[in-house]
Image (cartoon, rainbow, N blue to C red):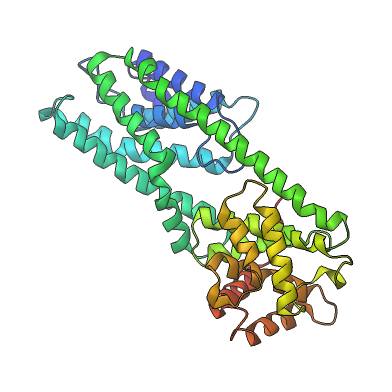
């Protein structure tokens, strides 16, 4: 920003147009808990400005420092009253700087001059830069996710790369198309090509609102066993938080982690069929047949909540040998058994982990138990809010 202030703003009307676009996209941002990018319009505008080489047939004269300055200033201006998270702001600025540093010097020195904006080679070059920028963003996002939640870096990076074809592809494609359209038609192309992404942003907000409502319903149902006195307070939330951490350590996808979380929250619902609560709500010491009956009843209840069928399957398979269970069910069963054992004053955390290791022949998969031990060695994750 100091460099831009010293050298002056090149083509200020263009910088103003893109700044307004980015600020409006940031102002339309919402904060759903699970959203990957809650301001796709601002992100697309950022990418479009970084890859802008011409405006209506005239060459663009801004450089990479001005791109970063405009993006940072517009993002902060659009976030007045509700500042963005620092990690998300850093990701946007880094993405803008990376894309602009790759593109603007080549454009300024005339390397791209032999390719007009309507040339297919020019479009292919922009797509290549888009892929590199997306890869850079995935690397940074994986670093930030690992810093927040822990776990191995490799599985976190794979999950970020798997998510690229989602909303990220729509953002990137819109940014490239806007850069090409402005090169041919001028700044009037900006509002035209923003409309599809704006509709996508509204749809994303609706989808995240539905997901948030579903999670609140599941959390309320999970608390029913606590209120009725069948399970200790906070048991389901502890199992859900620890289950997500273990699943992340094992490299589960984002969808599989959601299944683990939902199943962990509702795995004890079947206990409501019992006439008397179990001691400390622990199902692990029960005979296999009784545990299977509780699991089947819980699965029948879960199927009525509208969650994905994989969640009900995990709940129903809690009493099966681990070789007959999907990996998500193995995670929930092992973490639930650990929490049951660790809550017993006569056992404790270390003894609980030892009991799980001794039961790896039939009940608990050794790989899951070792992942649990790794997570516990780093520090037990805090339960998520319900």
Return the x and y of residue 153 as percentages of the image width and height. Answer: 47, 62
| Residue at horizontal 42 percent and vertical 57 percent from the top | 158
The residue under the point 53% across, 77% down is 323
Relative to 129, 227 lies left or right:
right
Examine the image and state in which quarter residue 120 appears.
top left
In-front residue for pair 6/288? 288
As drawn, 305 above or below 293: above
> Residue 182: which quarter of the image?
top left
**In front here: 348 or 136?**
348
Residue drawn 74% across the image and 83% down it? 351
Position of the N terminus by quadrant: top left
**In which image quadrant can residue 274 be found?**
bottom right
Query: Is residue 350 depicted above or below 212 in this figure?
Result: below
* Left or right placement of residue 51 versus residue 143 in this view: left
Q: Is residue 122 visible?
A: yes
**How many numbered discs sit on the rendered protein?**
0
Residue 258 in percent (x, y) is at 58, 53
Query: Where residue 109 appears, x then y in whole percent?
Result: 18, 32
Question: Can residue 267 be seen in the rendering of this structure?
Answer: no
Q: Position of residue 329 (x, y in %)?
A: 59, 67
Residue 276 vs 186, above or below: the answer is below
Residue extending furthest left? 114
């Amino acid at each position: 920003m100091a460099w831009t202030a010293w050298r002056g703003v090149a083509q200020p009307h263009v910088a103003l147009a893109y700044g307004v676009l980015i600020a409006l996209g940031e102002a339309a941002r919402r904060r759903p808990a699970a959203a990957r990018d809650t301001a796709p319009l601002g992100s697309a505008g950022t990418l479009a400005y970084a890859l802008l080489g011409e405006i209506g047939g005239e060459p663009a004269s801004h450089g990479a420092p001005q791109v970063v300055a405009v993006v940072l200033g517009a993002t902060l201006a659009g976030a007045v009253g509700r500042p963005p998270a620092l990690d998300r702001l850093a990701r946007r600025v880094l993405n803008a700087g990376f894309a602009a540093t790759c593109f603007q010097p080549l454009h300024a020195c005339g390397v791209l001059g032999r390719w007009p904006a309507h040339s297919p080679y020019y479009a292919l070059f922009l797509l290549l830069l888009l892929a590199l920028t997306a890869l850079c963003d995935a690397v940074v996002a994986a670093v930030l996710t690992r810093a927040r939640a822990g776990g191995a870096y490799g599985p976190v990076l794979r999950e970020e790369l798997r998510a690229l074809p989602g909303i990220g592809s729509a953002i990137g494609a819109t940014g490239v198309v806007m850069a090409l359209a402005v090169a041919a038609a001028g700044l009037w192309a900006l509002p035209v090509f923003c409309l599809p992404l704006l509709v996508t942003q509204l749809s994303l907000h609706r989808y995240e609102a539905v997901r948030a409502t579903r999670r609140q319903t599941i959390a309320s149902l999970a608390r029913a066993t606590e209120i009725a006195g069948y399970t200790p307070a906070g048991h389901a939330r502890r199992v859900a938080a620890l289950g997500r951490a273990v699943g992340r350590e094992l490299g589960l996808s984002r969808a599989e982690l959601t299944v683990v979380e939902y199943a962990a929250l509702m795995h004890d619902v079947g206990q409501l069929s019992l006439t008397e609560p179990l001691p400390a709500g622990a199902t692990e010491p029960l005979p296999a047949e009784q545990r299977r009956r509780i699991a089947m009843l819980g699965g029948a209840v879960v199927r009525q909540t509208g969650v994905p069928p994989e969640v009900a399957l995990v709940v129903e398979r809690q009493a099966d040998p681990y070789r007959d269970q999907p990996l998500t069910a193995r995670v929930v069963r092992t973490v639930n058994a650990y929490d049951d054992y660790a809550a017993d004053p006569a056992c404790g955390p270390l003894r609980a982990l030892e009991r799980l290791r001794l039961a790896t022949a039939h009940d608990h998969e050794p790989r899951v138990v070792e992942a649990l031990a790794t997570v516990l060695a780093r520090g037990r994750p805090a339960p998520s809010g319900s």
